[in-house]
Image (cartoon, helix red, strand yellow):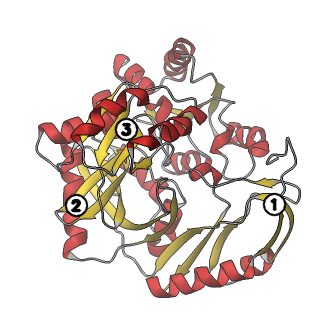
Amino acid sequence: MTNLVMVMPYKAYLLAAKAEGFRVCAVWDPSLSSVMPTSPRDFPGYLEELRGIADRFLLTDFADQQKFSETLRRAVADFGADRLYHVGQEASMLPAYRVAEELHKEVNPSRAIENLNDKFAMRRLLAENGLSPVQFGYARHWREAAELLATFRLPVVVKPTELAGSRGVFLLEDESQLVQWGRVLDSYDYTGPVLIEEYLRGPEYSVESISSHGVHHVVGITVKSLGKPPLFVETGHLFPMPDSPRAKEISDLVVRFLTLSGYLTGPAHTEVIWTEHGPRLVESQARLAGDRIPNLVRIATGFDCNRAVFRALAGRPLGSVTAERCARVAYLTYPTGVLRAVRGLEAVRALDFVHELSFPFAVGDSIPPVVDSKTRHGYVVLHADSAGQADERVDRVRAMIEVDVDHEVPTGAGTS
C-alpha cells in the first residue's frame, strides 16, 4: 500500500507521508484559509507549497457534496489509490469516509468516524454501553433546547454537535442566557443540532493517541487550562501529565471508548474531565490535536506524531515515547482595539527555552475579543524541567511583550 488520496493534508502530514514511503494525491479546498495559524493572506502561497510536495494536487469545494464526492472518486481512480484518507478538519471528514467506504478504500468504517467526531453520536454510544455516564439532551436547533432545560440542574454546558475548536460551547447558568448563546451560534452561521450536558466540574485533560489496526497506543496526556465561563476557550496546554493512578484511569477509559467506537487506525484527540466520580469523556476527534500539541509532544519526548500516523497506516511499529522534559503552549491575550505598537517580540524569540512565538497582528490591525480558538491573540511554545518552571517562563514572556492599543476602533476596522 503506497498510493494515498488524502483530503486536506497539512504540510507536516505530506512531509511525513513521503518520508514513510507513500505517494500522495492531495485534495484541498481553496476557501479554507482559516487553517492558517498566521495570516489568511498566506494561504495561496501555502497551497502552492503543498502542490510542490504532493505527487498530485487537486482543488475542489468541500461544501458542494456532489462535486466533492465526484472529485474524490475520480482522484482514487486516476491515482490508483490504495486508500482514501482524511485526518484534517472534521467538517469534511465523514463525507470523505463514506466515499472511501463506497470504493472499499477506507482506513476506518465511517460509523467509527461519526462516533468520534459527532458529539451526539459519542454520547449516545457511551450511554448505550454504560461507559462514562453523563446526563445529556439533544435538540435539532438551539431554540428547541429551552424545553429540555427543565430536566437539568443548572448550570449546564450547551454545545453544537458539529463545530470544533471550542466554537459555540457555552456555560448556561440561567435560561435567560439561551438567546445569548443563540447569537454565538448565529455568528458561526450554525443552524444544526445541539447538545445540553450536565456541567462536569474538575481539571481537564486530553489524551493523544494513535491507533494501529485496532490497537490503541496512548502517546501521552495533556494538561489543559481553560478560560473563564461562559465560553470555554482554552488558554494553554502542558505536556505530559506525569504517570499516576489518575493518568492510567484516564488512559484506560479512552482506550475502551476507541475500541467501542470501532476506530481502527489513525490519530485521536480525546478530552476528559476528572470529576468527583472519576474521569468523564467530553468529546473526541479522529485527528491529531490542534493548538500545537503535537509540537509539545515532539519537544518533550522527541516522538513525531505526524510520522507515527503513517507508520501506523503502514502497519509498522510506532516507536517508544519517553518524556525528557515538559513542554507548554500558552495563549496570549491583549486589550482589544487598534494596535499602535508592539515591543519585545524578538527578545522573546531569542530566549533559549522558546521554540515558537506567534503574534499575528501588524501595526494598524484590530485586536478582537477572544471568543474561540481562532480569535486568540497569539501564543508562545516553550520547554521547561517542570510545570512550575513552565509557569515562571510563561510569566516572563508575557512581561517582555508590550503592546500599545487604541481602544477606539474606527468604523470598518478589522484584522488585515
Does dot 3 land on a helix, a strand or a loop? Answer: helix
Mark 3 vs mark 1: in front? 1
What's the residue at 65%, 30% (across, down)? 57
Circle 2: element type:
strand
Q: Which of marks 1 and 3 precedes in the sequence?
A: 3
Looking at the rendered structure, the kind of residue marked 3 is: Asn
> 382 or 274, which lies in front?
274
> Residue tagged by mark 2?
279
Amino acid type at image mark 2: Pro
Vertical placement of residue 405 versus 32, above or below: below
Q: Earlier in the sequence, mark 2 or mark 3?
A: 3
Res 4 seen here: no
- Whether residue 387 appears in this view of the structure is yes
- The residue that disc 1 covers is 407
Q: Position of residue 115 (x, y in %)?
A: 29, 36
Q: Amino acid at mark 1?
A: His
Q: Gap in Å between the C-alphas at discs 2 and 3?
A: 19 Å
Report x, y in % for residue 127: 16, 40
Q: Residue 379: where, in percent of width, then height?
A: 64, 65
Bin the neighbour count of mark 1 within 10 Å (Cα to Cα): few under 14, some 14-19, many 20 and up.
few
Camera-nearest residue between 320 and 203: 203
Expressed as whole percent of the image width and height from the top left, the position of residue 123 reads 25, 40
Which residue, given by chain and number where applicable, does mark 3 sit on?
117
